[in-house]
Image: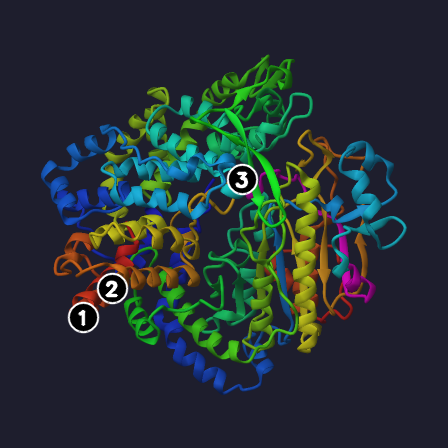
Amino acid sequence: MNKEIGINQLKRRDFLKAGLVFGAGAAGLAAGYAAVPDAFARAVYAAKQNGMANDNMLVMIQLAGGNDGLRTLVPLTDPTLHDLRPKLAAPMVSQALPLNKDYGLNHNLAGIKGLWDKGKVAIVQGVGYPNPTFSHFESIRIWETGDPTRRQVDGWLGRTLAKAYDSNGHPLTGCACGATDVPGALRDLQATMTVIQNQKTFGFTGGSEVEAAVGALYKGTPGIYGALFDTAIATANDTIATLRTSSAGYEPMADYTDKVQLVYSSKNQLAAALQLAAELIVTGTGVKLLHVTLGGFDTHYTELNRHDDLMRYLDSAVSSFYKDLAAHGKADKVLIATWSEFGRRPKENASGGTDHGAAAPLLLIGDPVKSGLYGAEPSLTNLDATGNMKYAVDFRSVYQEILGGHLGADSNEILGGSYDRIPFLAAPVAV
Amino acid sequence: MQNMTRSSRASGTDWASPLGRESAQIMQLLRRTTFGYTPAQLDSALSAGYSRTVDRLIETRPQEPPALAGASAPGGRFAVPQLQQWWVDHMLTTSTPFAERMTLFWHGHFTSDYRKVADNTFMYWQNLTWRRMGLTNLRSMLMQVTTDPAMLRYLDLATSTGQSPNENYSRELMELFTMGAGNYSEDDVRQSAKALAGWQLPPPDSIATVTVDQAKMVTRKLPVYSTQRSGVLNPRRAYKGAVTYLGHTGTLDTQGVIDRILAQPATAAFIASRVAEHFVTSQPESSYITKLADAFRRSRYDMKTLMRALLTSPEFTADASYRALLKSPAEFMVHGARALETNGLGKLIASAGSGMGQSLFDPPDVGGWPNNAAWISSNTVVERVNYVTLALSQVKGSLPSAADAARTHLDGVLSAQTANLLNQAADERTRWFITLASPEFQLK
């Protein structure tokens, strides 16, 4: 397995060395933003002139490891489920929060069920792609790049940054929150994005003197990693400058907590990551595309408690995030979407868990959605040769609606084709 | 490597490779196979020469770390930072640092994380195992990793039965540990899941009743082990029938599965790619992999043969390989401490890795850690610089002279910016800061 960024592509980034980033670095950023005082004018300002010009934002939540779709959106009346999952089915069906007579949400998704009741949740069922792979890494890459043929190396959100926004000098246009590395979905060597693990500690120990020295040290760095290094340092400096202002202008209007009981502790602080996302959104930093991750969904073993705990964690973090955005009057601009590399096998294994699966539902949350169930219910009796559910909706149909309908970007250019429409948005932007 | 050469030329500002000189080759060798060096350690390698240094790296028996006192706690319930610092302290002081580099390589390859394993004694044992076995034979290593208690937990083989197999270990054994995706079918995953089933955790020597919550008087019965152990096969949980696996039909035990895997040419090529990406270049050419894989397979999967072929290959010291790799956070930090000639930064190093993307015993996922370019982001570069600042503030007493640091640690090959800032630096501390925070020092 090779998790490298394509080094041979680095030369494409040489234009950054010509001074685009550094010319419009910390000083340029300050000058540019100061000239556009209104917070939301900044977001528009970051959009390309000939591209779109709306101030909508996207938050993608990765449920890493392969989220069990059948325990997320639970089929309530299908007897086959109990045959396939003698241990797991009964408790999840009896406790589910019904959405209609056939389906209910996991019992720990009470906050999201509340948003459903207010018309703010769309669920697309049976999402997948042809000839599914059951490798985490291959499937993650397919979802990240939007390319099941595995030729594309740039992420779908990275390409969106590169094609639809002017991210140079506006590194917060794309941001991975609560992470240390660039998620594959945001990766594109022609785009600038930032990665912030923790906004409270993000910055140089030793302050502006160190910041200046490092800024001078990483300029025109030679070698194959030179452009990556220089861009990372310039981006960090711009981000530090932006966070300095944004943290002062943000007061959370919801309780975010990562003190949750999990069967084993999480690497990701989902609530803290979403609180950072809220700060960036609320303070008008020009952020457009945000990515956060919650891991632990690879539930081969003792799935009952582990998945329930993860659902509760997801529910509390997302509920707080929505509440915070709404209290700040920003909920109408933000679409929240979950994704996971695959669902899980309908048949449970001996360990009280489930192995890697295929098609699964996606959650779309926020004021921009038109509430309801979309796609097609996956059949538990007509499984494929690997014992997995067949997909009904190509995942790129969901991307297409997000890109075109929510962000107003040219989805055809970014995805390299068009797909069946899934009309889960209340008022899609005309492209 | 062609791609790298081209892109370097395109930028027009590359560092001039000094690798025509044996001394520079030796410094690169040490940067890639150890955790850095003090001036005295460098001098000793320089006087031995390249080829004898390779011999010494490969043939010296790994120095064992001191036993970790807390590791006998019932149920492995001791603090993870203790385990992390124990390893970092050994990286800082060991006389056989290549064994530690190989241990780190295998920790990322046959990876496990303490969260799911939920028994830090098992994590400790796994670390001891890769130090002892890291330069032995892939066949014995594969048998060992399959029955390693931490791995039995991490990839669920401990709960897999022939009647209802769990595919987790079966899949990753082929995808991540040996052959790579695309060299087996989904049916092979299911078949070897059956053939591998039946392993269980080793039975403990005794059971201790431990109060886990004083306030609520909650007690738990936890296993106690007096010595390091491997998993045991429970024939009643194993699969009895025949399987068709990688083109062979018949009854198959775990050794049989491993031998089928070793019979596939993809296995030698996959392991060769992994070590080449880790030690030589981010994008090895296929002819290079073939050459390494052939030597590896001919030796019946002897790791010393593979590593010797790699370290003595022309590719390892080619100009195109100069600064072609990025130090992982652990390497970068321990290199820094060795350059500062201090052993006292273990606690800082053990905790500072997480912001750079590398927390020991806690890999991001079952694929272990990435290499090279994936270590660079806005978050990680800031954290690398912050480590240098903190390390310099924590060194006890006076800093060693930085007069020779650029020559000793950066080959004297500097970018215009690094050279300028070093010239302008007013004091020793600033010179060390520039040296260790420089792009040159991040590379190897």
Left or right: residue B59 versus residue B103 is: left
Secondary structure, mark 2, is: helix
Secondary structure, mark 1, is: loop
Subunit ID for the residue under disc 1: B
Comes first in the chain, label 3 or label 2: 3
Q: Which residue is disc 3 drawn over?
A: B118
Cα distance between the residues tagged 1 and 2: 9 Å
Bounds of the magenta segment: A113-137
Q: Which residue is disc 1 drawn over?
A: B425
Residue A121 within the magenta-colored segment of the rendering: yes
Q: Which residue is disc 2 drawn over?
A: B433
Please tell me which residue is depicted at 27% across the width and 33% down the height of the picture: B63
Q: List x then y, in percent, for residue B45.
A: 14, 40
Q: Residues within 10 Å of mark 3 (few under 14, many from 20)?
A: some
Q: Is residue B249 visible?
A: yes
Residue B344 in the image: above or below residue B186: below
